[in-house]
Amino acid sequence: MSYRIIVFLLISSVGYAQNSELANRYFFQGEYDKAAVLYKKLYEENKIRRVYFKQLLSCYQLTNRFDDATALVNSHRATFPDQAYIDIEIGYNLELQGKKNEAIPYYEKALKSVEKIPSSGYLIGGTFTENHLLDYALKTYQLAMELDSTLNYHSYIAVIYGEKAEIENMFNTYLDMIEKNENYFATVQRYVGRFVTEDNQDKHNILFRNLILKRLQRNPIASWNKLLSWLYMQQHEFDKALIQEIALHKRQETDLTRISQLGVIAFNNNDFTTSKKGFTYIIKHTQDPYLILTANLYLLKSDSALATNKKDLEEVNKKFEEILNAYNYNPSTVEIQIAYADFLTFKNDAPTKAADILKGTLNKTTNDLQRGFIKMKLADILVYQNKFNEALINYAQIQTQLKNSTLAQTARFKVAQTSYFKGDFKWALTQLKVLKKSTSQLIANDALELHLLISDNIVGDTIHDALKSYAKADLLAFQNKNQAAVDTLSGLLKRFRGRSIEDESLFKRATLYRKLKQYELAEADYLAIIALNQEDILIDDAYFNLGDLYENHLNDLEKAKEMYQKIIFDFASSIYLVDARKRYRKLRGDVIK
């Protein structure tokens, strides 16, 4: 092939692609006449490309050019006489003109063609679906599968049921897919996830659970336990999920990775009791060194989180020492050492011992990521000791050594937070401005929250006295010196009453009162926020936390219902809406059937 021919073909190919792209752009912008000109040219040059025929036909139909549409379908039929899907297009074109009775025979003819070639069900069913003829599409897929058992159109049928709002049929179809082939589990999980919520009393959640339970009784395959576990996890009912996972393990003696993952998720959602149950089960049923270390790590972290008195703390400290003496201070126990350092510093007020442990480990490990985590905790300990400049150096080293990683972004946030603790608010804002676009949603949210706090409270205050006092209280809270933080906030509220920082101070103090189990004082602060301004950004936080106080600590269930009801009716966009609805229904005595 000559050079000129090659160049000509390349230019033609590029022009063809550009015309297609431009036609698509016109179509999706609703400029159907312009799109039709281009699609007509593309169709005439390549009639075998069904997409050009379909888009050109749609342009004619959307602009009521039915004579052109009729001429097009007839011409296409003449070119491709054996293509049964064209009958659907002819019929639908008639129906759009109000000639439904004339259209039906064409639909029936296309449907009947599937009896001869069941595998054509894919194209015929798809064409019916494209033209919103869902009942015919359903019949097509079902007929094809009846005639040929090797065909699997369950996913298309499920989508159609979803569009028809026949949710039970949709769920059953997805479950049929798994019953036929358990490899469809992830696919079903993904699609069903669009219909279930965190609310365990949502009608779709209840329906899906009941359908799984029926199948579990009839045919106890592993996937039903897995699906139930997954559903309970969506609903944050980790204890119920664990029951399913343990039942599954006892039946199949599979590896314990799923239970380990569930234990971590439960821990991260502050369900320490379930986390402990899961990891205790793992230790009893495995010899895998990695799983045993992971289990011990989360058991220790859970015990640390639950420790409330000196005796508890001594017991947790003893357990840490026993595990580390058994497995040694080496790279394999880095996570346990970091957890121990955190416990020593923030629970036992022993930062020097904690830092010595981590410095020793840092000298023994060469793994960059492990070193990053160790340095992060070391820097946190330095902040605890008010050694801000040294902490900033460590955070900066993590950013340099692990560029673009999530850990590096966390370190950058810590730089901003430490600068804020120091009172260097402008530098903190500079860092936070970048972090608001972080790829980690959690970091981005934390950055946005701190950015708003600083920016809202430095306007009109050249010496930033109020914000400095709040930052001091925030630092004391970070250091787990909760009573000192409360005292600082109380002084702030006396000095700066009526300033923009008042609501944040009240909310922060209420949070600390709860940690100190001074629930009546926390109640008073939440009520004060509500009294300040009904348009305040913290108002739904106050109502939800009041509801939780009344429900779980002050034993006033009627007031709890009142607070949750306030969120349900007045704060429809609140992040607490689902949880408030769930709790309200529970207190009202709704029964899940």
Image: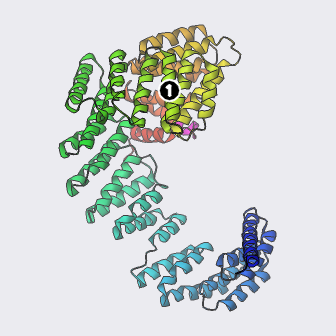
Tell me where residue 211 appears, x and y as whole percent: 36, 61
In what element is the residue under mark 1? helix
- Main SS, magenta region, reads helix
Q: Is residue 405 above or below residue 93?
A: above
Tell me where residue 583 appears, x and y as whole percent: 42, 38
Q: Is residue 575 above or below residue 171?
A: above
Badge 1: few (under 14), some or many (20 or more) residues near its Cα, within 10 Å? Answer: many
* Residue 570 is inside the magenta segment: yes
Question: Closer to the camera, 323 or 198?
Answer: 323
The answer to whether residue 527 is visible is no
Query: Which residue shows up at 62% across the image and 19% down it?
Result: 425
Quadrant where the N terminus is found in the figure: bottom right
- Residue 558, image quadrant: top left
Q: Residue furthest front?
A: 2
Q: Is residue 116 above or below residue 336?
A: below
Query: Which residue shows up at 71% across the image and 85% down it?
Result: 73
* Residue 340 is inside the magenta segment: no
The boundaries of the magenta stretch are: 566-572
Question: Closer to the camera, 332 or 515?
Answer: 332
The answer to whether residue 477 is visible is yes
Tell me where residue 117 appears, x and y as whole percent: 49, 88
Q: Is residue 15 left or right of residue 226?
A: right
Identify the residue under disc 1.
395
- Residue 499, image quadrant: top right
Q: Is residue 568 left or right of residue 317?
A: right
Question: Closer to the camera, 330 or 261?
Answer: 330
Tell me where residue 14 appears, x and y as whole percent: 73, 69
Question: Closer to the camera, 364 or 26?
Answer: 364
Which amino acid, mark 1? Tyr
Q: Is residue 103 above or below residue 437?
A: below
